[in-house]
Image: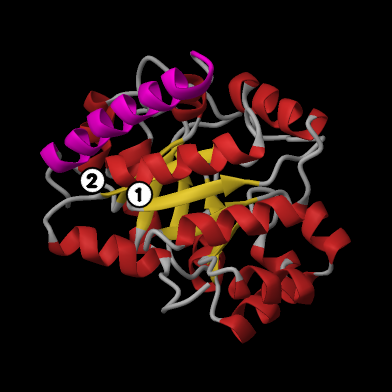
Amino acid sequence: MTGERRTAGAAIDDARAQGRSALVVYLPVGYPDVETSIDAARTAVEAGADIIELGLPYSDPGMDGPVVAAAAQQALDGGVRISDVLRAVAEVASTGAATLVMTYYNPVLRYGVQRFANDLAAAGGAGLITPDLIPDEAGEWVAAADAHGLDKVFLVAPSSTPERLEMTVGAARGFVYAASTMGVTGVRATVGSGAEVLVARTRAAGAERVCVGIGVSNGEQASEIAAFADGVIVGSAAVRALGSAPGAEGIDALRSLVIDLRRGVESGVSA
């Protein structure tokens, strides 16, 4: 990786300077295969994504809905490894997009926390989103991330207490991930009504940047969220589009979706 590593915070701040929310797209590495997943992520950047979340497939995905879980299982069946994820990070980060890894914490522990932080930074990665890790149990990761200047993205939910919000905001760097509804990820017909309240509560706890995910599937919903959030996160819909057809057709479907989502975040008026 050559050049300066781009952080999620910088990507969100640049979008804000353009008067819009950032678009964050999640895709699992290895789905439907490693090379296609890299091509898909680079296509998402070309189509307008500001930040890419590369999923590290895991065998016990507690928060993943059926679309993402099935894709991750296919990637695992195909033999995807952490080395593949790090290569994907380097390929995607070379586009200039902020590139995060979304991972459950157990693979990081198995790999070695310090080693993972070092290798992720060397690949040009911005940092980690760790959905199952809470800040008060994240001491080793926080220290490793701080040593390498990596983003630490933790999740908050409508059930988060004021104390939990404050702790999470204090530990996070890059942005805070607001899960708009309780439960697993997945495409929904409507975005949870509690999302705007959760963003306001998280900002009141001191957050500079709050991105909303879980349930966004089209440009209209992206526009709705962009009116009050700093970033709009799309996962299951992107995976579904990529898997809707083999090869180039799936890539084209993903491109069309991301273009629609980008129009959505541009039409929303960010708070």
Mark 1: few/some/many CA within 10 Å (<14, 14-19, 20+): many
- Residue 83 in which image quadrant: bottom right
What's the mark number on residue 228?
A: 2
Task: Report the front residue among 126 and 36.
Answer: 36
Specify the principal SS of the magenta part. Answer: helix
Circle 1: element type: helix
Image position of 183 with respect to 66: above or below: below
Q: Amino acid at mark 2?
A: Phe
- Residue drawn at the location 76% of the way across and 41% of the way down: 80
Separation of residues labelled 1 and 2 (CA atoms): 8 Å
Q: Is residue 125 visible?
A: yes
Q: Nearer the viewer, residue 131 or 37?
A: 37
Left or right, 155 with reference to 233: right
Place residue 258 in its image quadrant. Answer: top left
What kind of element bears circle 2? loop
Q: Position of residue 34 (x, y in %)?
A: 65, 39
Amino acid type of the residue that numbered disc 1 sits on in the rendered structure: Val
- Taking the image as shown, residue 43 lies to the left or right of residue 119, namely left
State the residue position of label 1. Answer: 199
**Image x and y of residue 182, in percent:** 55, 31
| Magenta span includes 213 | no
Q: Are marks 1 and 2 in contact (CB under 8 Å)?
A: yes
The segment highlighted magenta reads 245-267
Residue at the outermost bottom position = 147
Q: Residue at x 63, y 76 (%)?
A: 145
